[in-house]
Amino acid sequence: MQLSLFYDYESIYKTSSFFQKCETLFLAVEAITDEKTLRKSTGRLGYGPLCFLKALIYKNAQQIASIPELIRDLESRPLICEMIGFPFGKLPDSSNFYRFLDGHKNSEIQELLYKSNKLLLEKGIITTDLIIADSKPIKANTKENNPKNPNRSLNKNDKIKWNPKATLGYYSYIKQPVGDKKKKFSFFWGYRTHVLVSKEGIPLVEITRPNNFKDHRVAKALLRKLCQIYGQKKGRIFLGDAGYDERELYNFIKKNLKSEPYIAINPRNQQKPKTMGPHNRPICDGNLEMKFAGTCSEPSRTRKKFVCPIVHGSKKEKKRLPRKCPVNHELFCSGKCYGCTKYIDVTNDARSQVPRESYAYKHAFMLRTEVERYFSRMGDREAEQTSHFNYLSIRNQMSIAHLTLSLTALAACILKRSDKIRCFRSFADAA
């Protein structure tokens, strides 16, 4: 086999979208860092902290499962080593990567995320008028998460060995055979990474906490951080699933942030009145579910208004309804034939004032699936199963995973591919 002794780096770079992707991603890292950004860890690393940060971002971008696998990958890619700052053949030991993760404050890495996002905001790539909250489980590296372990502990008061910060929590519902009505659930020891994502799918603020931290309390802290970093914005919409359905969070968003909490109802948090229909709207005298007609604000009270569905329903809705009132109500048959009207008093109740029946709520809530796609893009980057034991290392690991997706958007902007800010695999491909 005959090989060339010399390689034209520029030619390889120009003809390979993979190397363009990596080079641009590292340029994005350099755009938000300087010598004072990351302090050097204690001990002798041999290389600057920026080299280790680039290597770990490359690990996340390539979805490499662990640090030993990262080193094996770099050993086969001399050009990537040069881009990162590691001379080929002189790669640092894996212990240096672990020391990097354990030797920096989590706030230092989070600060890089904020710098990246501020650049994206200046370019008009992302906005903060609508934010989406969600969390993802992180299984701790312990035998207690092995379902085949006969001595597995399911006592939430226990402290597991090597992972004392990990706590027991719900993981998923186990589907049962047809006819088996008994519900079964799976639990795990570990943590959860919480994030607020923009409607463009870019992480704005994030934090990793033990599994027993309630979603709504973590969301409250993240919202404070969001306003501190990006400024408060009146009328901002907060989207969350039923896990955030707590009155404390509603009141905080409504009163303190002057924003709109669009949160799904958790049936376990309420007792549905008998007069309400399947869509949480009142039932009229004719046993028909009424139509939402807006919120009426008065000096002394606030009420939701509901009207006759036969008179005020859309053409599509009227096809499923009778033409006349089933009980021949006088308001339907005389005068202006406006039909029945009912009100629900929601005074001083931010949770009840959410217009879940309105088109604006339904249209905005459709965007909540963006956070599901966001976690899907994170993939197997040790997000479901961490190989670390130290709590700080796990937090830094997840912060770098979130930072990678923000830097992907920034790298796409450097290449003037703003339509590819979410395409972490192909943002450097030819148009």
Image: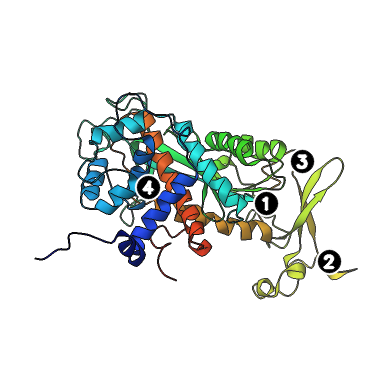
* Number of the front mark, 3 or 2: 3
Q: Quadrant of residue 49?
A: top left
* Number of the front mark, 1 or 4: 4
Q: Residue at x 58, y 56 (%)?
A: 125
Image quadrant holding the C terminus, namely: bottom left
**Pointer 2 or 4: first along the chain:** 4
Check disc 3 and report the residue beneath it. 347
Image quadrant holding the N terminus, namely: bottom left
Q: Is residue 169 visible?
A: no
Residue type for callout 4:
Tyr
Element under label 3?
A: loop
Q: Residue at x 55, y 42 (%)?
A: 244
**Pointer 3 or 4: first along the chain:** 4
Q: Residues within 10 Å of mark 3 (few under 14, many from 20)?
A: some
Check disc 2 and report the residue beneath it. 338
Residue type for callout 1:
Thr
Disc 2 to disc 4, C-alpha distance: 47 Å
Element under label 1?
A: loop
Mark carried by residue 211: none
Disc 3 to disc 4, C-alpha distance: 37 Å
Check disc 1 and report the residue beneath it. 275
Q: Quadrant of residue 423?
A: bottom left
